[in-house]
């Protein structure tokens, strides 16, 4: 029922028109509703919403502060764990209610963006090196490098507000390592290993791939 209808009904009532059927005819308000409105007018003299008659909020101010503290301490915490933590403080809230509240409060939960640990200093040094070797004989140059492959990706989602957080990923040499070389004419075969790379082992890899490198660099 709109506020305009309530105002019209109250105005008619105050002007002496208090017959339910006549009020129904003039306002087009259902007769059953008219009786309820009349009862409310007789009781309070108004049709204003009394307020406070809805279901009380389970997420109280103290619960909101507690949720914020829990998330700041552990951004990967689940809504079920948050529900249990609140229950230990005497506040019973379902994990679904907590999830809705966090969503309405602007929280999101996703995997952090992965980015390599490359600083601005690293970038400047690489540009400087490239400029110094701009005129090198790149057709007779081979690059080799090794890297680590993580077999299982990070599946821990984290709560955040605003911009999605970034998780820096260092090289993890406890996983599968891979070595390869490439030049302007092609690349060597991929070599996988698990042990730690050191000088002796690196020399072994080069000796094993010497025929390939020899051929790629023109046989000289």
Image (cartoon, helix red, strand yellow):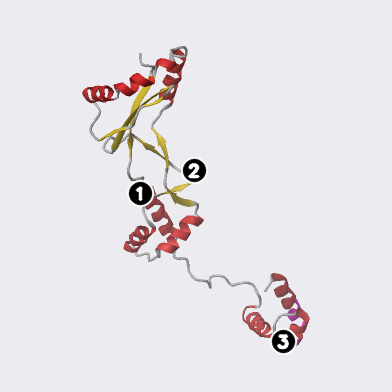
Look at the image and tell me whether residue 95 can be seen: yes
What's the CA distance linking mark 3 and mark 1?
61 Å
Read off the residue under disc 3.
20
Read off the residue under disc 2: 163
Q: Quadrant of the N terminus?
A: bottom right
Q: Is residue 52 left or right of residue 146?
A: right
Point out residue 193 in the picture as x, y percentages from the top left corner: 26, 34
Question: Which residue position is annotated with label 1?
Answer: 74
N-term mark: 2 or 3: 3
Q: CA distance from mark 2 to mark 3?
A: 58 Å
Q: Is residue 59 visible?
A: no
- In the rendering, at what x and y percent does residue 88 appear? 31, 62
The vertical placement of 134 against 199, above or below, is above
Figure quadrant of residue 81: bottom left
Bounds of the magenta segment: 11-21
Q: Is residue 13 magenta?
A: yes
């Amino acid at each position: 029922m709109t506020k305009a209808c309530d105002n019209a009904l109250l105005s008619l009532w105050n002007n002496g028109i208090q017959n339910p059927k006549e009020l129904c005819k003039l306002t087009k308000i259902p007769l059953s509703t008219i009786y309820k409105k009349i009862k409310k007018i007789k009781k309070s003299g108004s049709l204003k919403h009394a307020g406070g008659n809805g279901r009380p909020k389970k997420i109280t101010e103290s619960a909101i502060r507690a949720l914020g503290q829990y998330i700041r301490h552990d951004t990967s915490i689940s809504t079920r764990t948050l529900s249990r933590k609140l229950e230990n403080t005497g506040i019973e809230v379902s994990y679904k209610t907590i999830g809705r509240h966090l969503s309405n409060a602007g929280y999101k939960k996703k995997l952090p963006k992965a980015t390599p640990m490359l600083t601005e200093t690293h970038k400047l040094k690489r540009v400087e090196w490239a400029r110094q070797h701009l005129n090198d004989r790149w057709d007779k140059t081979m690059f080799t490098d090794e890297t680590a492959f993580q077999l299982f990706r990070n599946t821990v989602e984290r709560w955040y507000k605003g911009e999605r957080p970034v998780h820096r990923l260092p090289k993890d040499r406890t996983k599968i390592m891979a070595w390869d070389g490439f030049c302007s004419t092609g690349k060597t075969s991929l070599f996988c290993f698990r042990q730690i790379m050191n000088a002796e082992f690196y020399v072994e890899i080069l000796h094993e791939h010497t025929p390939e490198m020899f051929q790629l660099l023109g046989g000289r």
